[in-house]
Image (tube, rainbow, N blue to C red):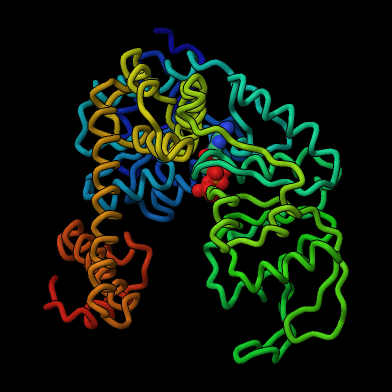
Amino acid sequence: MSAEGDTVWVVDDDRSVRFVLATALSDAGYQVAGFDSADAALSALDTRPPPQLLYTDVRMPGDDGLALLEKIKQAHPQLPVVVMSAYTDVASTAGAFRGGAYEFLSKPFDLDEAVELAARVLGERHEQPAEPVAEGEPDDDVLVGDTPAMRQLFRAIGRLAQAPLTVLITGETGTGKELVARALHRESPRARQPFVALNTAAIPAELLESELFGHEAGAFTGAQKRHIGRFEQAHGGTLFLDEIGDMPASLQTRLLRVLAEGEFFRVGGRELIRVDVRVIAATHQDLEALVQEGRFRADLLHRLDVVRLRLPPLRERRGDVPALAERFLHGAAEKFSAPPKRFSKAATERLLAYDWPGNVRELENLCWRLAALAPADTITASDLDGMFQAGERANADWDGALRAWALEQLAAGTPDLHARARERFDRALLEAALEHTGGRRAEAAARLGLGRNTVTRKLGASRRPRRG
Ligand SMILES: Nc1ncnc2c1ncn2[C@@H]1O[C@H](COP(=O)(O)OP(=O)(O)OP(=O)(O)O)[C@@H](O)[C@H]1O
């Protein structure tokens, strides 16, 4: 493989490592430059073209290799960085990968391996076709789909985007309802105005009214300052109301009035607020059935249901699975600064045969896990077997066990169920994190995204003996 023209930089304060690695790389045909500190490499980046690959040590006087990695990833996100260190514990390697390292070499390393790595990185970069970049549009927002159902949907989006009609989007969880709402906004004359999303199910019922319509200072206990609600925030633009089927009855009435009149009072307010907002609502529930059961207002349904877009579940458009999977693997590779993985033919067949109860979101999660964990560049059918079964089984067991527990406690009339469930939930998470980190609390806290004090407090609350 020709390495001509490819430049590789080696950053290490240890002269012998620098020398040995630089010599081996230049013997392999690369143009090599050595630097004895992160600062030296960074100043060189200001004056010279960046290399195609950079190796850096971690512990060095001045900025360490991880700080260098961070600065490089800001200025040159595409430049692959190999981190080398004698510290190979989980925290150090995870820190390097989190920072966007392409690979981690444990010191002392095998010289041939280090050079092969360069050939692999640079070889792959040459083979990679240039990706067209959609201008001015975050990649995440692109709707993938080429099946008749999706083409029909895209046409409907194009048509509907122009008129300020209210749209009701229905579809199972994870089918892309929010993405479609964003597309409707992006393609509409309101595109330069705000797109504001509110998930009705994620907000406690008692806060929902003020979240939607805002409140004045002193409107209720705890309302110290005026709060501008989502309707006002979305003025001129689009308001996306997700999980509309979960809206409490009293608010349904209020929402209906606001939609009819286009004006409202903030909670505790006297000033009539007029807004110009296009509402897009979404639900995974059968709203007609909720109407039958008296849980959803029929007149609100009619008001929201001016135009309905139904998103088909993924199993009804399996033909889109390969393209979606490829997009997610590419997205993950970009995030990890690594070349994208591919599915083998047999693996693709497995994906096509699967039922996808969690729809596109499930496929996306699976691809991210595979991008991080599958051992080789080609994902095999057996990699896949392990993956989706593990994820599914764990999730199914977890949800199922929690439900069963809740039903049992409800039947037994146990009070404060939520608090009790939370205590158990916290305890299970903490114990798992402590087990994973060998009892190191600070690390367990960091892995859970909690403060160390919170962990100590929760450990106290669950009366666990102290460890580590
Ligand atoms: N057609 C598609 N092309 C690319 N990505 C998609 C597509 N559909 C969904 N996704 C991705 O799948 C994930 C789930 O989509 P989204 O959040 O829009 O689903 P949803 O139907 O609103 O789910 P929920 O009902 O659970 O809120 C998102 O990360 C989204 O970017």
Q: Quadrant of ligand 1?
A: top right
Q: Is residue 389 visible?
A: yes
> Vertical placement of 383 versus 421: above or below?
above
Q: Is residue 42 visible?
A: no
Q: Residue at x 23, y 32 (%)?
A: 386
Q: Position of residue 71 (x, y in %)?
A: 52, 47
| Towards the viewer: 432 or 90 | 432
In which quadrant of the rendered image does the C terminus lie? bottom left
> Vertical placement of 467 versus 297: above or below?
below
Q: Position of residue 238 (x, y in %)?
A: 76, 53
| Towards the viewer: 76 or 344 | 344
Q: Quadrant of residue 427?
A: bottom left
Q: Residue at x 67, y 38 (%)?
A: 309
- Apparent side of residue 410 relative to residue 52 in the rendered image (left or right): left
Q: Position of residue 42 (x, y in %)?
A: 53, 44
> Vertical placement of 270 versus 88: above or below?
below
Q: Quadrant of residue 251?
A: bottom right
Q: Residue at x 53, y 50 (%)?
A: 285
> Vertical placement of 393 versus 453: above or below?
above
In which quadrant of the rendered image does the N terminus lie? top left
- Apparent side of residue 161 relative to residue 430 in the rendered image (left or right): right
Q: Residue at x 33, y 62 (%)?
A: 448
Which residue reaches farthest top? 1
- Apparent side of residue 327 relative to residue 415 in the rendered image (left or right): right
